[in-house]
Amino acid sequence: MKMRVAVLCVFCLVASSAIAEELRPEQAKAFVVGKLFAYSCFDGTAGMGRIMADGSVVGTIAPGGRGETKFASLPPGTIKISGNSVCAHLHGLPIDPCFTVQRIDQHGFRGSIAGSDYAYCDFYQRDPHTQLERPLLMNGLY
């Protein structure tokens, strides 16, 4: 269960649409790192999170949009630039999934697993002073 939530969290925090400007990995990093984004995905999953400069991830996730919102954090090096791609390294997975990042406007982007047009998440920047609730850590991953 934890691995499934971790994979979904990473997919949701970095995860394309033909209507937007595709960002190269360094552009995506500059656009996303350190900013707080709310997200919603094709399968109903929703939450809020940040990707830090060291590739760590911290945020909340409600898989499938149902049930309790959980706190999730992933270690440094989880999100990284690998060649011409933004990829996720998750312990226990046989591959590192890579992502396409496309800017929708100055405050939002759409992300998907590279090569997939249907599996995506939309991300919209939120107030940078918003704090993710620490008490959620008791009910989720760490």
Image: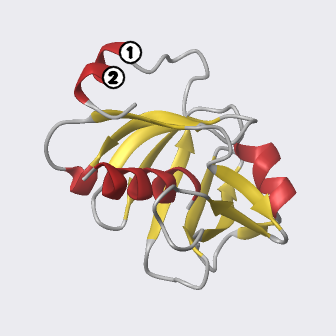
Question: Foreground residue, 106 or 42?
Answer: 42
Q: Give the residue at x 44% y 21%.
A: 132
Q: Is residue 130 above or below residue 5?
A: above
Q: Which residue is mark 2?
A: 137
Question: Foreground residue, 11 or 24?
Answer: 11
100 sits left or right of 118 in the view: right
Instruction: Pick the quarter of the image with the C terminus.
Output: top left
Q: Quadrant of residue 135?
A: top left
Residue 119: x and y in percent read 43, 75
Residue 44: x and y in percent read 27, 59
Its colouring scheme is secondary structure
Q: Quadrant of residue 111?
A: bottom right
107 sits left or right of 25 in the view: left
Q: Which residue is mark 1?
A: 134
The local crowd at label 2, few if under 14, some if 14 to 19, many if 20 or more residues have their Cα within 10 Å, is: some
Amino acid of disc 1: Arg
Amino acid of disc 2: Leu
Q: Give the residue at x 80% y 61%.
A: 25
Q: Looking at the image, do the residues carrying marks 1 and 2 touch, with CB atoms under 8 Å apart? A: yes
Outermost residue on the left side: it is: 67
Residue 15: x and y in percent read 55, 62
Q: Secondary structure at mark 2?
A: helix
Q: Give the residue at x 63% y 80%.
A: 18
21 sits left or right of 7 in the view: right
Q: Secondary structure at mark 1?
A: helix
Q: Is residue 133 above or below residue 70?
A: above
Q: Is residue 6 above or below residue 60?
A: below
Q: CA distance from mark 1 to mark 2?
A: 6 Å
